[in-house]
Every structure is written in structure tokens, then in C-alpha cells.
Image (tube, helix red, strand yellow):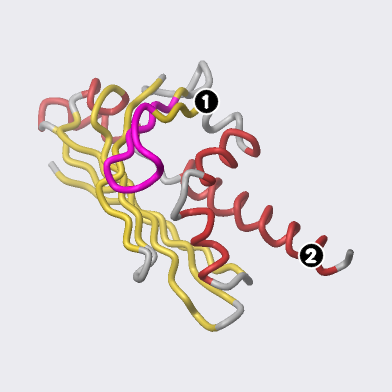
Amino acid sequence: MKGSLSHELEVCLPAGEVWEVYGTLRLAQLVVELLPRVVQKVDVIEGDGGVGTVLYLTFPSGTPGVQFYKEKFVKIDNEKRVKEALVVEGGFLDLGFRSVLYRFEIIEKDGNSSIIKSTIEYEIDEEHAANASFVTIASVAAIAETISKHLAEKKTSVMNS
């Protein structure tokens, strides 16, 4: 069984500014700093943030279904502003999922606004199909909202100083 969940958030920030965070390891650092209830800790296992980088994500106790997982960056396209991370160990894979892919796209609307599109694609064995309910878009939606708010506040404070 295959599934896909998607979330879009329009932000009043240029796509390039948003991509400076989403396209780098800065995203993981900010998520831990700003959203400790979503992700407790992120360790870089290998790589420098480019394709092939492996991260070990630890989630707060009580997170339904998932305590940790490793993800590998399998695509980073700086021109199209697309980043894909594949879960390679733990997490949903321990619950009968064959694959889980996170995709982040930063879509330019105009010079001052963009859309953060977050997608989770998964494939799960039929016998574990009930576990598909553990996949939720809530965490990536919270990340998009929090990161964009942080960037907007940072931009405002720079402009006012």
C-alpha cells in the first residue's frame, strides 16, 4: 500500500531566504532549538549537509510509534529548491513500512513570497496497513510554520535595528 500526505504554507519571505534554511543543516538545528516537542535531538552521522548526509533524529518520549530514525539526504536541488530525505533505519521502518520519504519544496511565488510544500510519501506492507495512521503531516506543518515565523521575526528585527 502506498500513501502520500502533503502540506503547503504560503509565507511572506523570498524563496531564497527560506531555502537558505531548508537546503542546509540549519533546518535540523532550528527544529531542535525551536521545536523540542517535535524533535528532541539531531546528530549528523555522516556528511556535511549535501546528498548522502545521514542524520539520526531522536524524538521526545511519548511520540506515537517513533522514538528515533536515521534519514539520508537523497536529493538536494538548489536550483529547483527541493530536498528529499529517505528514512533508512528505525522509526516507521520498524512498524512495517517499506519506505518513507520526506520532500521539502520551496516554491517562489514572487520576489517577496513563497510556498513551503512538505510531502511525506510512504509504502507499507498490507499486513501492517493499520500503522499508516502513524504517518501525520502535523510535524512538517509545525516545522514550516515555526521556521517561517522565526525567519520573519529575524528579518523584522534586522530591519528595525
Q: Would you say 127 lies left or right of 7 here?
A: left
Say if the magenta span includes residue 129. no
- Please give the label number shown on residue 154: none
Amino acid type indicated by mark 1: Lys
Q: Helix, strand or loop at disc 1?
A: strand
Q: CA distance from mark 2 to mark 1?
A: 28 Å
The quarter of the displayed image where residue 36 is located: top right
Residue plotted at (19% across, 37% down): 99
Left or right: where 115 falls relative to 89: right
Image coordinates of residue 130 in percent, x first then y, are 23, 29
Q: Residue at x 59, y 53 (%)?
A: 145
Q: Is residue 131 above or below residue 99?
A: above
* Residue that mark 1 sits on: 41
The answer to whether residue 51 is magenta is yes
Q: Is residue 94 left or right of residue 20?
A: left
Give the residue pinned by disc 2: 156
Residue farthest along the right direction in this orientation:
161
